[in-house]
Image: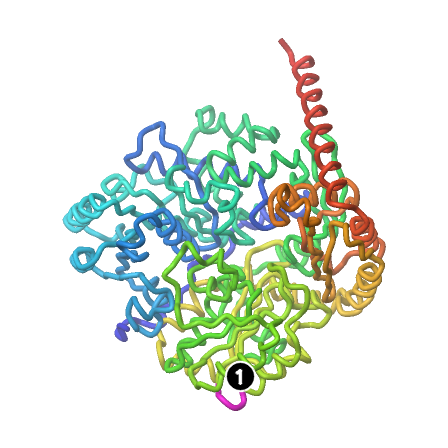
Amino acid sequence: MPLNVDLTESAVSLFRPAAPETLTILTDLIEQRHPIFAMPSWFVTEDAAHAGYLISTFLREIGAAPASARYRCFFANSRYEALHGAIKLLRHRAAATASRHRGRVAVLDPDGTLHRRADPLGEGPERALAPGLVFADTVAALDESLAQAPCGGLVLRGTDRLGAEHLAELADVVRRARRDGTRVALDLGDVDPLAAHDAASDLLGPDLFVLGESLTGHQVPFGAFAGDPEMFAPWSHPSTGFLHSNTYGGNTVAMRAVTARLLPRWPEGSPVRDVLAATTGDWQRTLDLYARHVNPMTVRMHRKLHGALHVVRAEGARLTVELDSGRRLDLVDGLCGAGLGINGHNPLDAVTDVVRRHDPGRDYVGELDRILARETGLARAFPAVSGASAVESAIILARLARPDRRRIVVFRHNYGGKTLVSLLATAAERTRAPFGPLYADIRYIDPYGPEAVREFRREAAGGEVGLVWVELVHGSSNSYAPIPDPLLRAVTEARAEQGLLVGVDEVLTSFYRCGTRFAHQGRLPDIDLMSLSKALSYGCFPTGSALVSEEVYQAARRANPLLVEELRGQHAHQLGAHFAGHAVAQVDALQIASRVAALSEVVRRGLAAMAGNRRGVVGRRFAEGLLGRFEPRVPRPLRRLVDPEGEWLTFALISWWIRRARAFVVYDVFLLPLVATEGEIQQVMDGARRLSRISAPRLLAEAAVFRLVERVRRRARVRGHAVRRPQ
């Protein structure tokens, strides 16, 4: 690690004080009850389609691509998340030749920021936290590393700081790499949105572009990676379309900020503005634009559901969807934006108490640090822009704090995120498989297995475990119970006896989502690290935090002070911290504890009233507080025709919940609003009771009828518009 780097400079945030334009975007969205976050991965908006189209056009204009070129974008929350996504796509795209390069990716990283995150202890590409990345800080070193072994991808950073001579040398290196079939990603995280062209884009002709916060004026957390449809081919199938995802990507605040920064490139009356005008207010054209420039698999799902996922209004505990036929349905939000927020969608106090009172000169980040220290008992906060970035920071800090203990224990069914580091805490093998090599010294233990306690104790007794990472209640798996108490007691004992660190993922479960203020309270008495995010967002702004004890902070700082200061500073966002601090204050102001206690009782009674029908479509079920799951089930004779995890049953369940129960429940998970009324929760549970009495054949038949009826209604609506259209 270069110790001559100024640590104060490394701690500088990537974000600037909130400008009036950003505050106006937030005010307009909240006051108009416009959905900001509705659901992860499947959320399509006109704003996101426009942003994707503008980014595609922008990249075509600043590079050497032909006028007919078209790019697809994957939205993330930071340049670092986007870089990880690009590396994952490079590896997946090169899977056919993996036996030759073994997932190796070469990275030109002059400032070392990506290198430090991937290999915090400087252990080399084989033993790094994100292995298989070979870093070079100069063009000559990059050329040398490429000559030593084949690679499946090449990532170029810092090209804007290269002189013409070194850029020409880099172009020669890229040409040689391409002859071996290597695809290239170019980091344009600091690109000027009004630039006429980019010398590196023009000269290098990359397959992927990585974008960052400059496209929101460094106002809103944002990142993206973009490439042509052929580059995205591995993620263009129903079974792979959501292998890479995130909760906040494509949120409406960021999309409007991107559009506001890019749109001045094109004058009024230009073809670009004509495209935006033609899709404004036209949902089918919006879907077409989104399919071309963002994710066609998401659009495929929307079209099959005929508007059931088309969210047009979000307020409190309710959403409104507009079907393709024009019908609008008012729904109880049973997903709550994947558990986002304390006070539902678009609470007006977000405007009156945060946006209008925001003081750009005030240190909200420091205030939030103190608030979270009081809340969690963990002294040091590391700002994040998402749950995944909070988990990633926590894992990096744990690795630094226990440098001689490489092993990490994660319990199966855990979900940590999908960056190359947070992916380690995501225990689903299918989600990790295409993106290796990944950190090898990690053990996944089934917490529900009969030998779980014995297996964990045997692992901990070896003295090699540095971190145990725990999500006590799972929101993204097929588990139907919290992690058992005997296993948690074993974790507590191992912490005391072995000196290992215990981290808890409270991204989904914090602030009474699962009945207690934090899900680990009363079950894990001592912890060292924690990740937070969704509750802190207040349903309005992407933010998060990794919390660590003073002991972990000091130990990590001794190992790599530069990286620790970068993690503390680079994602510090005063407006995000303002929203987060307000969110925490509202937990008690809104009496969330007593609300959830009452609402949880409604959920408990509702689950008890569900039928135990062996032929029914619902099998196991569970709930902790206002988080729960129903097991979709297909009778054995039908399984040859209907996959219980396939899209037919998924579509049938979603359409049933929305049509019949008037509840926005997506497939098998419910995350009920903390501020819902008892009547709204009862409506969802009445729906669950009715669903438990339905057989799979009947559910599928109803879904088929719904699709047919909506198709006929839409055609009639289109014909009616055509008749009324002026000649």
Indicate the quadrant containing the N terminus: top left, top right, bottom left or bottom right.
bottom left
Image position, residue 589 (x, y; %)? 75, 67
Image position, residue 347 (x, y; %)? 70, 53
Q: Which residue is mark 1?
A: 457
Q: In which quarter of the view is residue 342 placed? A: bottom right
Q: Is residue 496 magenta?
A: yes
Q: Residue furthest bottom?
A: 497
Indicate the quadrant containing the C terminus: top left, top right, bottom left or bottom right.
top right
Q: Residue at x 44, y 86 (%)?
A: 463
**Residue toward you, 628 or 392:** 628
Q: Is residue 399 above or below residue 39?
A: below
User: Helix, strand or loop at disc 1?
Assistant: helix
Q: Residue at x 46, y 36 (%)?
A: 293
**Residue toward you, 660 or 725:** 660
Q: Which residue range is magenta in the image?
A: 495-499
Q: How busy is the neighbourhood of tag 1: few (under 14 within 10 Å), some, or many (20 plus)?
A: some
Q: Is residue 270 above or below residue 458?
A: above
Q: Is residue 468 above or below residue 229?
A: below
The reply, left or right, for residue 45 in relation to residue 601 is: left
**Residue toward you, 538 or 43:** 43
